[in-house]
Amino acid sequence: MRKTRVAALVLVLLVLVILLSHQGRVAVLALAVLPSAIGVLPVDPLVQLTPRPDREAFAFDYPAGTVEGDVYSPGGRGRHGALILILGARPIDRDDPTLVRFAEGLSRIGAVVLIPASSGLAAGRIVPEEVDAVVGDVELLRARPDVDPTRIGILGFSVGGSVALQAAADPRLDGKLALVNAFGSYSDATDLVRAAATRSLRYAGIDEAWEPHPLTLWVLARQLVDTLPDPTDRDVIDRVYLQADDSAHGDVEAMTPVGRAALSILDGLPPDQAEQAIAALPPATVARLNGISPARVLDRVTTRLFIMHDHGDRFVPYTESRRMAALIPPGHLEQYAEFDLFDHVTPDRPPTSPTFYIELARLFRQLYGVLLYVL
């Protein structure tokens, strides 16, 4: 009996030590925020047990336009770690319930959360100047009295993750980021174009069919319309893909060979023809694609990196994250995870099978790893 009591006391003390440690506290908080991240779980204890965070708007200019957004703050005394949630091209609204629930959940467990919306990404334009917007986001947080400047991380979703990775390589943010988590992001914009053109994924022994989501084709068309030199080429692609006017295909004969090659990329091509069409893209388009590709700067990133992707992603191929992971310098990739839980970056699997909970455990591990450096 005495041995049993001693063992029970030791167990209780061990649990207390774990809970009182930083790692134990973060594990509990990461578990608590899961319902806010997923939304399909039956209860969200944070809503009942914690006050709603304060929400305030902000705005500033950057070279490509304007950034507007919201800051969620847990309140209270002292300084908190912070997370910047950078969304993709043509992102969901800042008042979207899924986004608000996740931001509030992170703030309820003690993080200041900043959600920026740049006018460039809102219009579907992906340009190198988006890095300037991220620099502005970080400096805004560093100036807040409730933020610990040594604990600022970025959660980048879709294109937002690619922009965040490029920002992490910028000298202005050297030593100012605790981590970047890129979720559903591309590594090389030309590889993304190639996958969309061929309707297939080919990388490191993978050879699979892949049907891009219409929004992916829309965003790629936006980059082409911005950079093609001939006005007729721009007009036809604009009408076909940005305005969904299929009758504009009747004007293809008026396009230049370069314009027809660009349009054929969006329409889909066999692999050999796709390579010829990509090779025919004009210098301005090539410069845009190169200038927005994290693959070209990953060797200069020195912060901790977390990569995650859903295996069934139709917006950005999961192979892009595998390419990304292969390029990250040794020692900087903290965690890599693939899921079968999301529609691109939005949770959409119902909790009806054991597989769901396996995926949930994988998500917990990713969240825990990120929050260790922020909370």
Image: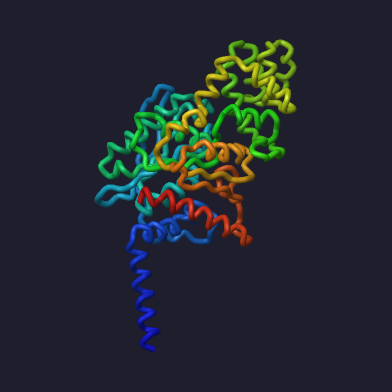
**Picture coordinates of residue 186, whole percent (x, y):** 55, 35
Quarter occupied by residue 244:
top right
Q: Residue at x 40, y 22 (%)?
A: 63
> What residue lies at 46% left-to-right and 49% top-to-bottom?
102
- Number of numbered labels in the structure image: 0
> In terms of image quadrants, where is residue 134?
top left
Closer to the camera in the image, 147 or 35: 147
Above-or-below relation of 188 to 184:
above
Q: Residue at x 31, y 43 (%)?
A: 150
Q: Which residue is at 67% across, 40% downward?
A: 206
Estimate the x, y position of residue 189 in percent, counting from the top left: 57, 28
Taking the image as drawn, is residue 348 in sight? Answer: no
Q: Position of residue 90 (x, y in %)?
A: 53, 32
| Extreme-front residue of the structure | 330
Spot the residue most to the bottom.
Answer: 1
Q: Is residue 229 left or right of residue 372?
A: right
Looking at the rendering, in which quadrant would you find the N terminus?
bottom left
* 63 sits to left or right of 139: right
Tell me where residue 106 appears, x and y as whole percent: 41, 50
